[in-house]
Image (tube, rainbow, N blue to C red):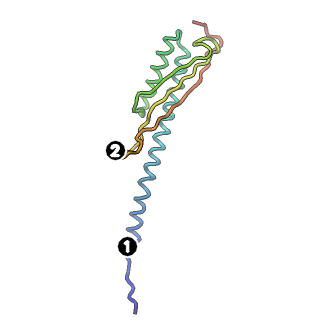
Amino acid sequence: MVILQRETGAATVEFVFLTVAMFLPFSWLVASAFSLHSAALALDDAARQGARAFSLAETPAAAEAAGLHVANLVLSQHQLINSEPQVQFTCVPSCLQPQSVVRAEVGARVALPWVPPNLGFPTEIGLSASHVEQIDFYRNTP
């Protein structure tokens, strides 16, 4: 005669452990994706606003200062970038001439959420964005 043993509550315990084991990595992936996407939008906005400020200045020196100031201001408002951002402006064929093109490139390293630094995993990811702005045809040349 076989005696059947009852396993009451075993499915509930397994379900709880599997749910926690699946939920934590999924939460990390979602938080990382949102953090990286938010930082990418911040860099894109900084590049756009920096190029616009550069294109509206009167002299090349003032344009460089205005572009850097505005790009850093935009990034500081988003509060997502941990490292010092790299902001670079290039002009083709020359700066602030009518119908010339200004290209703003902004790059920074973004920290991943919930990653301890001593595990050997990367704790930051480098992101960059660029924007091209054309100088107005009717602009007075400096």
Which amino acid type corresponds to the residue marked 2 in the rendered image? Asn
User: Which badge, 1 or 2, is on the more N-terminal residue?
Assistant: 1
Residue at horizontal 45%, vertical 40%? 35
Residue at horizontal 37%, vertical 76%? 8
Which amino acid type corresponds to the residue marked 1 in the rendered image? Gly
Residue at horizontal 53%, vertical 30%? 129
Q: Give the SS element for disc 1.
A: loop
Residue 90 higher or lower than 78, as above or below = above
Residue 59 image point, x, y percent: 52, 9
Near mark 2 (Cα within 10 A), the count class, few <14, some 14-19 or many ≥20, is few
Task: Residue under label 1, please give it.
Answer: 9
Task: Residue under label 2, please give it.
Answer: 118
Q: Nearer the viewer, residue 122 or 76?
A: 122
Which of labels 1 and 2 is toward the front? 2
Near mark 1 (Cα within 10 A), the count class, few <14, some 14-19 or many ≥20, is few
Residue 65 higher or lower than 86, as above or below = above
Q: Which mark is residue 141?
A: none
Residue 13 higher or lower than 48, as above or below = below
